[in-house]
Amino acid sequence: MPRVKKGAEAAGEKAVQKITKGGSSEFAYRALRDAIVSLALEPGSDLEEAVIVAKLGLSRTPVREALVRLAGEGLVQLLPNRGARVAPMGWNDIREHLEAFDVAQRLVTRWAAIRREDSQIEVVKRECDAFKRAAGHRLADEMLDLNWNFHAAIAQCCNNRVVADFYLQLLTGNLRISRLAMTYKAYSSEEAYLAHVGNILREHDEMVEAIERSDPDRAEELARSHANLARKRVSETLIQSLTEKMEVNLGGKREVVF
C-alpha cells in the first residue's frame, strides 16, 4: 500500500484546529471525516479519544457520537477494549470495495435514467459543470469533492433512499482510494494525466445525456465503463507503488520491502 507522505498528519491537525471550541458532534464528525478521506489520518491509524477531545475542545460524548457515525459509514472501526481506528485499506479491502462500487454505480445510474425528475437532472447538470471548471484549473482536491457531488446527484435521481444511501457510503469510501491514485503526481506524464481527466469529462457528459434521454441501457453501460476507468487507474498506481519498493539482489531475486 502506498503510504501517505510526511506532513499529511500535520495538515489534518490544522483542519481539526479550525473547528470552533464548544461545537457539537457534527463538528467532530466533519473534522474527522475530512481528515480521514483526505488521508491526513492514515488508513489503520489509531484514533485516540483523548487526543481528539483535546484538539477539538469538546467533551467525550460528541466525539464518541462522531466515531459511531463514521463507523456506520465504514470509515472507522470500533474495536472492543481497544478504542477506534481509521478503517484500513489493504489490497483485499480495495478490491472488494471496487467490486461493490461497480455494481452499485451501475444500478443507481440505470435507475436514474428511468426514475429521474426534471428538477433532479438540472442538479446533475450543475454538478457536472462545476467539476469541469475545477478540472480546467487542475484543482485536484476540488475535483475529487465535486466528482462526489456529481455522482451523489445521480444517486438522488434513482429515487430510492436505501439504494442511494448504500451507494453514497461506497462513494465516500472512494474519496480515500481516489486520493491514493488520482493526484497529478501519480501520473507518469502530463499527457497521461490530461488523457485520464479527458475520459472522465467525456463519460460525465455522456452519462448526463443518457439520463436526460431516459436511456437506462446506455446509462448503465457508461456507469460500468466509468467504474472500470477508475479501477484501472487505481490498479496502475498500486502496481507502480509496489514496483518502486522492489529491490533486486545480486542473485536476481526480487524482494519487496513494505
Image (cartoon, rainbow, N blue to C red):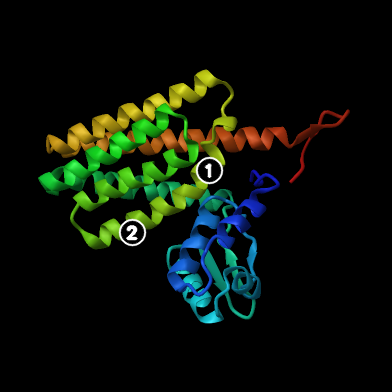
Q: Identify which amino acid the numbered label 1 is placed on.
A: Arg
- Compared across the picture, whether 118 is left or right of 187 comes to left
Residue that extends furthest to the top in the rendered view of this protein: 191
Q: Residue at x 11, y 44 (%)?
A: 118
Nearest the eye: 124 or 238: 124
Q: Residue at x 28, y 44 (%)?
A: 106
Q: Position of residue 79 (x, y in %)?
A: 58, 74
Residue identified by numbered label 1: 179
Q: Position of residue 87 (x, y in %)?
A: 55, 61
Nearest the eye: 217 or 185: 185
Circle number at residue 6 = none
Q: Residue at x 64, y 49 (%)?
A: 8
- Compared across the picture, whether 100 is left or right of 107 comes to right
Q: Identify which amino acid the numbered label 2 is placed on.
A: Phe
Residue identified by numbered label 2: 166
In the rendered image, the vertical position of residue 244 relative to residue 111, given as above or below? above
Return the disc, 2 or 1, that comes first in the chain's sequence.
Answer: 2
